[in-house]
Each structure stands twice: as C-alpha cells, then as structure tokens.
Image (cartoon, rainbow, N blue to C red):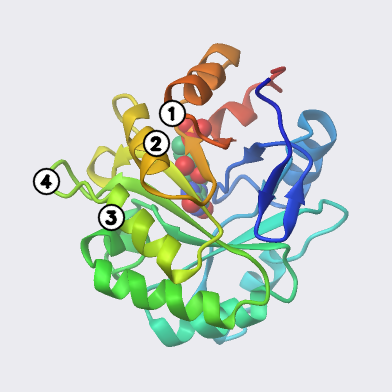
C-alpha cells in the first residue's frame, strides 16, 4: 500500500524510498551497503560544490564516482547561475537524476549565499533552477527546507517556482534553516507543498521507524519518503 514505483521525469524508481544525501556519510561505500541491505529506490550522493566542479577540483570529482548503484541522484549546491549551469551540464552526464540543494543550513555554506540561504532570495533561486533545468540532460529535482526561519516560510512558493521551472520532483524537510536539526520536523509543510504542486513530492525529516514512515504518507499524501539519519541505525522494513 505504501511501497510503490515512483517516476521522476523519465526515470522509474523501483520503490519510493530514497536515501537522503548526507555530506560525510553517503559516499560510495555507504551507498553500496545501503543499496544491498536497505534496497532504496534511489540513493543520493553527498552534495558537491558547483564552483569546485567548474575548477575541476580533484577531490570533488572523486566524490562524483559511482558504481552499480543506479539509479543514483547527484546533488549540486551554489548560488551563481552560470556555475550552477556548468555543473549541471557536467554532472548530468554521469548521474540519473540531478538534485539542487536549497536546504543546507551549515554556516560555511549559507555565508556564500548557497544552500538554504537561497530561500531568502526566490528570484535568484528561480534563475538557478531555470538554468540548471536548461543545461541538464537528466531530470532535475529540488531539495528544500520549509523556510529560512519562522518569518520566512516559503515552501509552497518555491515549490510552485520549481514546478514552473521544469523541476521533476521536490523533497521537503519540514524544518527552517534556523532550526538546524532541533525540535521536530513539521509534517504539515510537506502536506502543504503536496497540495500546491502536481510534481511528485518527497517527505523528509525525522522518519525513524515504520510508524513515522506511515504517518508521513498518511498525513501528507506524499509520493515518496526520504530517509537520512535513520539509515545509519538499521534498515527499515515497511
Ligand atoms: C551528516 C548530515 C549530512 C547532510 N548532508 C546533506 C547534504 O549534503 N545535502 C542535503 O541536501 N542534505 C543534507 N543533510 C540533510 C538530510 O539529507 C536530511 O534532509 C535531514 O537529515 C532530515 O532527514 P532525517 O531526519 O531523515 O535525517 C545532511 C544531514 C546530515 C545529518
């Protein structure tokens, strides 16, 4: 009833459970182990900097290596339209799905205007999404938090912008940037996005067990779920 195939653009996932991108965690060995024992429909790599791709930084290019783990999603971050376009063109040649990060709360990322900082500049976010979709040869997805802080909740707005820009699916983590990982992820943010757009919506945040997963599906109507930290504990059976 919950496990279903999921189509993202022209890519059909065997199931609708997705391993979240986690910097310092979802490297090649971790993805292969998760694929073997957890069987997610899609695995995501660690976020990579679009600027570092433009510079052909060796360590960054190494992070883009994959092996027998398809379908895979590779995530880029950045806030310069041109370098995001160049990175999209490059990465889309080696991935099945290309993901854009507009959720990362880390100070070293947001201080450059990247990650969740883009939730405060929707005009720039729109330009980036349009450019990435234009340059990518693969379906493009977007991963967001619900907003920057409680005064700037923009999930529905950016979801609509993304859909109009040609994004194929959107992942919603129901926390603001300022919450980092504190408190509880707000499931209603996922439901509101699901009610606002016609592209697949993936619910993310605090899914630790079967009950959490069912709650996410039941209360939001989301098309799939994304699991991050719980994948480090044990495989789930839902
Ligand atoms: C160690 C760590 C690294 C993360 N790195 C990324 C990342 O590179 N890109 C991204 O979009 N989200 C990243 N996240 C956020 C997760 O993808 C996910 O949205 C968040 O952890 C909430 O889901 P969860 O409660 O299932 O863990 C990271 C989270 C953690 C804990």
**Residue at numbered disc 4:** 151
First in sequence, mark 4 or 1: give its number.
4
Tell me how far mark 2 sits from mark 1, CA to CA: 6 Å
Q: How many marks?
A: 4
Label 1 element class: helix
Q: Are marks 1 and 3 in contact (CB under 8 Å)?
A: no
Is residue 104 rendered to the left or right of residue 155? right
First in sequence, mark 4 or 3: give its number.
4
Q: Quadrant of the N terminus?
A: top right
How far across and how far down the image is residue 165, in percent? 44, 70
First in sequence, mark 1 or 3: give its number.
3
Tell me how far mark 4 sits from mark 2, CA to CA: 18 Å
Label 3 element class: helix
Residue at 36% of width from left, 78% of height from top?
A: 127
**Residue at numbered disc 3:** 157
How far across and how far down the image is residue 120, in percent? 21, 61
**In front of the other: 222 or 73:** 222
Q: Is residue 168 above or below residue 212?
A: below
Q: Nearer the viewer, mark 4 or mark 1?
A: 1
Pointer 2 residue Cβ closer than 8 Å to ligand 1: no
What number is the disc on residue 220?
A: 1
What number is the disc on residue 190?
A: 2
Q: Are marks 2 and 1 in contact (CB under 8 Å)?
A: yes
Tell me how far mark 1 sits from mark 3, CA to CA: 17 Å
Q: Are marks 4 and 3 in contact (CB under 8 Å)?
A: no
Q: Is residue 154 above or below residue 90?
A: above
Residue at 71% of width from left, 23% of height from top?
A: 235
């Amino acid at each position: 009833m919950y496990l279903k195939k999921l189509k993202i653009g022209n890519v059909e996932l065997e199931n609708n459970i997705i391993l979240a991108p986690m910097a310092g965690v979802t490297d090649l060995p971790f993805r292969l182990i998760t694929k073997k024992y957890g069987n997610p429909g899609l695995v995501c790599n660690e976020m990579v900097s679009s600027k570092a791709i433009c510079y052909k930084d060796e360590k960054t290019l190494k992070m883009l290596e994959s092996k027998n783990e398809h379908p895979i999603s590779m995530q880029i971050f950045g806030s310069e339209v041109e370098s995001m376009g160049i990175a999209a063109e490059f990465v889309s040649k080696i991935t099945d799905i290309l993901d854009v990060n507009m959720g990362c709360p880390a100070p070293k990322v947001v201080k450059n205007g990247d990650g969740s900082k883009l939730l405060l500049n929707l005009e720039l976010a729109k330009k980036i999404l349009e450019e990435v979709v234009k340059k990518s040869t693969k379906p493009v997805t977007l991963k967001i938090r619900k907003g920057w802080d409680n005064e700037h909740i923009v999930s529905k707005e950016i979801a609509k912008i993304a859909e109009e820009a040609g994004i194929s699916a959107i992942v919603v983590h129901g926390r603001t940037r300022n919450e980092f990982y504190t408190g509880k992820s707000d499931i209603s943010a996922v439901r509101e996005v699901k009610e606002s757009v016609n592209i697949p919506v993936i619910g993310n945040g605090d899914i630790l067990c079967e009950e959490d997963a069912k709650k996410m599906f039941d209360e939001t109507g989301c098309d799939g779920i994304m699991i991050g930290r719980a994948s480090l504990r044990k495989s789930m059976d839902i």
